[in-house]
């Protein structure tokens, strides 16, 4: 289930959707993952209610993402509706994967969780590839193979181990806020590697993202707004199987 929700569905939809929308808009839509996660977590997980500091942090962080990538929008929000819907569904799927993993596999080690998720996702994607496309008929360059291996080891393997490690300690909502850091890291690499210009809006957006993450993890503002009521120990909502 986690492989399907966390890898197969979102990766497929993002790849397809970005063919018709700007990458900047895709980044903004991907930034909605924590917004969906906080609602789903509050509905499913008794230990992750919706609180004042989490809502404020999520909204501030999302505003920071919009500030960072918004100026790069070329076509605005019009057009490419199917692609936009695909990215939103991918975000919901990502959020659902995190909540489900927190619910069902919180006691499994990060290494085992990452291995199982990527392994099952590979099998499912391989079957779909042969059923829908003709992968063997495509000529693949050696550089492309090396890029895929690198992305698999670092971009997926290490990343998913870190994801499950954070999930077991932070919970689904706070872990999902890692999505806000993606454009920040991208901009930082652009400055260091490609010597791109840093604007005032870039600094403000980065500060908003970091501030949002800090606010969501703050010890203050824990007033409960909404959430699943506490249940007896051993209930599935507490992580039992």
Image (spheres, helix red, strand yellow):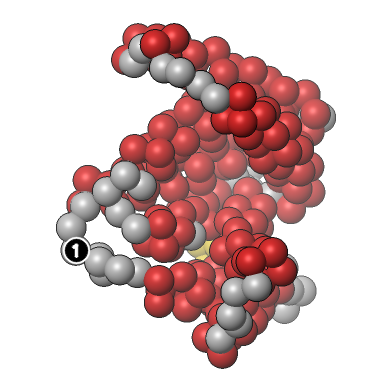
User: Could you tell me which residue is drawn at 68 percent across and 20 percent down?
Assistant: 116
Provide the residue designation for mark 1: 78
Direction bottom: furthest residue = 200
Horizontal arrangement in the rendering, residue 76 relative to residue 184 (left or right): left
Q: Circle 1 sits in a helix, a strand or a loop, which is it? A: loop
Q: Is residue 210 visible?
A: yes
The number of discs equals: 1
Looking at the picture, does residue 117 appear above or below residue 82?
above
Residue 117 visible, this orientation: no
Q: Residue at x 30, y 54 (%)?
A: 21
Residue 155 horizontal/vertical position (percent): 67, 40
Residue 10 drawn above or below residue 47: above
> In the image, what residue occupies the spot 46% across and 54% down?
30
Q: Along the horizontal axis of the image, is 187 left or right of 132?
A: right
Q: Residue at x 74, y 53 (%)?
A: 170
Q: Quadrant of the C terminus?
A: top right
Question: Where is residue 167 drawn, in percent x and y?
Answer: 71, 45
Rate crowding at label 1 as few (under 14), some (14 to 19) or many (20 or more) other CA atoms within 10 Å.
few
In this rendering, is residue 139 above or below 113? above
Closest to the observer, 31 or 2: 31
Camera-side residue of 19 and 219: 19
Q: Residue 138 in the image: x percent, y percent?
A: 41, 17
């Amino acid at each position: 289930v986690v492989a399907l929700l966390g890898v197969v569905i979102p990766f497929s939809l993002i790849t397809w959707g970005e063919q018709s929308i700007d990458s900047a808009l895709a980044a903004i839509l991907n930034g909605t993952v924590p917004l969906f996660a906080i609602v789903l977590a509050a509905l499913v997980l008794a230990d992750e209610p919706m609180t004042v500091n989490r809502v404020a942090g999520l909204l501030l962080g999302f505003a920071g993402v919009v500030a960072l990538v918004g100026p790069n929008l070329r076509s605005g929000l019009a057009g490419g509706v199917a692609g936009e819907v695909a990215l939103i569904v991918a975000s919901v799927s990502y959020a659902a994967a995190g909540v489900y993993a927190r619910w069902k596999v919180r006691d499994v080690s990060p290494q085992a969780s990452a291995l199982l998720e990527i392994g099952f996702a590979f099998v499912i994607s391989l079957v779909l590839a042969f059923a829908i496309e003709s992968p063997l008929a495509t000529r693949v360059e050696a550089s492309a193979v090396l890029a895929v291996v690198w992305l698999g080891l670092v971009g997926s393997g290490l990343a998913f181990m870190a994801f499950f490690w954070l999930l077991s300690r932070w919970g689904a909502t706070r872990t999902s806020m890692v999505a806000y850091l993606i454009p920040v890291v991208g901009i930082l690499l652009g400055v260091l590697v490609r010597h791109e210009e840093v604007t005032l809006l870039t600094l403000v957006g980065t500060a908003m993202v970091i501030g949002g993450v800090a606010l969501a993890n703050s010890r203050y503002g824990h007033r409960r707004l909404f959430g699943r009521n506490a249940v007896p120990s051993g209930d599935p909502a507490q992580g039992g199987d």
